[in-house]
Image (tube, helix red, strand yellow):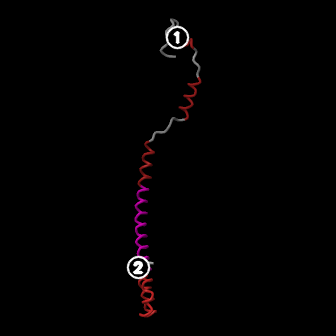
Amino acid sequence: MNSEELEALTQSIFDKLGEENSALIVDDVASIITKNNETISTIKELKADKEKLKSRNDMLIDSNAKLMQQIPRGPSIDDVKEDKETENTKIDLMSCFDEMGRLKSRL
């Protein structure tokens, strides 16, 4: 309920009760109007905060997506298989040396 609707409703109550009886409840109605105005202002603040957070969240999602695109992928499956094959290849000690007993430059 917005402020104008509440004002119209309270004025209608005052008109129906008359001047003498409305004096009995004027403090309660004023309290209701004050609390309603506080609630309306709180709702407006929360909506503004929500919009700020939503825009910040969208910005962070965009930034994270850009960062994720910059991260290089790990080795492919074929590279991993080749590495395992190389690890499993046994090297004969005699094949490391040439006929003069020197260490071969390439195996």
The magenta stretch spans residue 35: yes
> Which kind of residue does numbered mark 2 sit on?
Ser
- Label 1, label 2: how far apart the Cα atoms are: 96 Å
Task: Give the quadrant of residue 2.
Answer: bottom left
Element at badge 1?
loop
| Residue designated by label 2 | 3
Which stretch did the figure color magenta? Answer: 31-58
The magenta stretch spans residue 32: yes
Q: Which mark is residue 97?
A: 1
Main SS category, magenta section: helix
Task: Give the quadrant of residue 10.
Answer: bottom left
Where does residue 99 sit, x and y in percent of width and height? 52, 6
Assess disc 2: are there few (<14), some (14-19) or many (≥20) residues with their C-alpha within 10 Å of its C-alpha: few
Residue 79 sits above or below residue 53 on the image: above
Q: Which mark is residue 64?
A: none
Locate the N terminus by quadrant: bottom left
Residue 6 sits above or below residue 91 on the image: below
Q: Residue at x 43, y 93 (%)?
A: 20
